[in-house]
Amino acid sequence: MIELAGIIILGIIAQWVAWRLKLPAILPLILIGLLVGPIATLYTENGAKLIEPIWNGEKGLFPGEGLYYFVSLAISIILFEGGLTLKRAEIANVGPVITKLITVGSVVTFFGAGVAAHYIFDLSWQISFLFSALIIVTGPTVITPILRNIPLKKDVSTVLKWEGILIDPIGALVAVLVFEFISVGEGSGYTQTALIEFGKILLFGTTFGFTFAHALAFAIKKNLIPHYLMNVVSLSVVLLVFVESDLFAHESGLLAVVVMGMVLGNMNLPNLKELLYFKESLSVLLISILFILLAANINISDLELLMNWRTAALFVLVVFLIRPIGVFLSTQGSNLKLNEKLFIGWVGPRGIVAAGIASLFGSKLLAKGEPGAEYITPLVFMIVLGTVLLNATTARLFAKLVGVFLTKSEGILIIGASKVSRLIANYLKKNKRHVVLIDNNQTNVEKAKKLGIEAMAANIFSDSLTDNIELNDMGYLMALTGNSDINKFAIDKFKKQFGENGAFRIVNTDEMNDPENNPEEGLFSHTDDFIKLTDAARKYPSINEIELKDQEHYNGLIEITKADNDIIPLFLKTPQNDLKIISAFSKEFTDIKEGYKLVYLGKVFDFEEEN
């Protein structure tokens, strides 16, 4: 009981430490597992592990093959959640570079690492290619924490983010298929029997995954499942699919759950977002338990296998040769510059799926007596730990070294995608500013996207925004919703991350009627709240510019806007076309000369035509 409770407690502590230090959670999880597992045998009195995953006659959490069953079920849930995130539309729209990275790049890694493992460690081709299939996967859970605090060009962040998301289930699928091929061969190589069994695995895995995905979707759409049971029913169906598929074709369960997740993720289900949130929370708990168990299950003898020059040689080839070759081949003919390609080639940490499936497959093949199977788990763990440590400690420095580190964060994040926000965002976009709208109203988000404005549906009360590495170049924050509490919350929560150059919100009605108590972060004008902004945008849906003569001219125009509800000042445009956000006080602009422009929303100034 103490060991089981200890694993959960240590796992959650590791997750918190990872969050606090902005590191991938897999790093502290595996390190804790090694400390309470194989390393503990070096300092305990009786030379025993503090946590023994498998019952050894005296202690242990799982008797017999219990650990194997638990790992199998946990991996099936994690892979199902990964499959849910894989969208056909995203593969089509993310661009040729990302498409090539998950195809050409994967092929380069698969064959390159396989050949390297075969000749360096003298492993069989089957085991070598299983190893290479396992390290195809990078994964968003390891890339996101590393890049979260590195301001990069949007193109670079997008490539790394979407490569991790898309390659996660794809890499897992390749690893599953290679493993199945090895398993059905049973040492006889690529025989006709092996091919037939391999075909059965593909047939039953895809059939069960596809069929149960549609059955579950039908039940959800027809409201056959009460809302409070939705998540647990979905979980039970995932486990059912995994077990049933395995019964019809041994080892086809993992393929079935990946396919099921991919099919469901591409359906228009009303509760898909809730299902994703539930699976993410469950995955965090399972990952916390799983990787402490898996790392603790490694023996000192496994670690000793890696204490030689061959391990270092394989790591160097995978990280410093094979990964860059894959990236350069995938980015050939793209708009990415040499320094951007170098950085993408440098950042390739392997993740949770690789380590988890490696332990599962390694133990299975070891039990079958497959030659060289003892190398699978420690080699993959070495690649995972090594790449995470390397990238976590050097990514920021390397970004500065090759010149992809943004010294100025000029992007603008707007909370709210109403008509006012869309008008302002469209103007900013035309003036070559990176602007992103955030709203939990899908209709507003879709309207923004139709205008060519970058927008995303998100709940600001969740932590998903802070994990979005595509927002790393945001330096300005504008809260423009009709809810004063949401605007205040957005400023408090995201000011440091997205508003380092300025964080503003529109004043509420009470603040507007009490100018003496206007907030410092007040936006545009202390005489205009959301209602006035919306009304002005409805009557005069345009953003205009007027040439300024001097400081006095600017001050005079600001006074006119205070008296006219249909004219709202937005930005000050410099002669260099730089846009400065006007605050409710606008006291910061004291040296305005000829060549500056006032940018405003609403009707044209009455005297503009006369001048």
Image: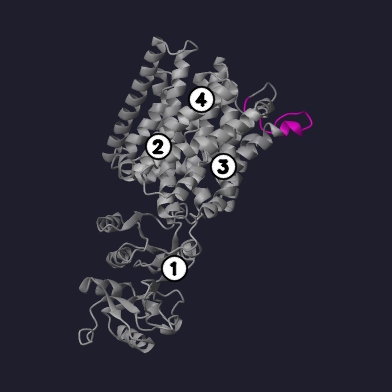
Q: Would you say residue 42 sits in the magenta stretch?
A: yes
Identified by mark 2, the residue type is Ile
Residue linked to disc 2: 102
Q: Position of residue 444 (x, y in %)?
A: 28, 58
Residue at 46% x, 12% y is 189
At x 44%, y 32%, the residue is 108
Residue 328 among those drawn in magenta: no
Q: Secondary structure at mark 1?
A: helix
Instruction: State the image quarter where residue 372 is shown.
Output: top right
Q: How many marks?
A: 4
Marks 4 and 1, how far apart at CA: 56 Å
Which circle, 2 or 3, is nearer the viewer?
2
CA distance separating discs 4 and 3: 23 Å
Q: Which mark is residue 388?
A: 3
Dot 2 falls on a residue whose secondary structure is: helix
**Mark on residue 115?**
4
Percent coordinates x, y for residue 77 in the rendering: 45, 34
Q: Earlier in the sequence, mark 4 or mark 1?
A: 4
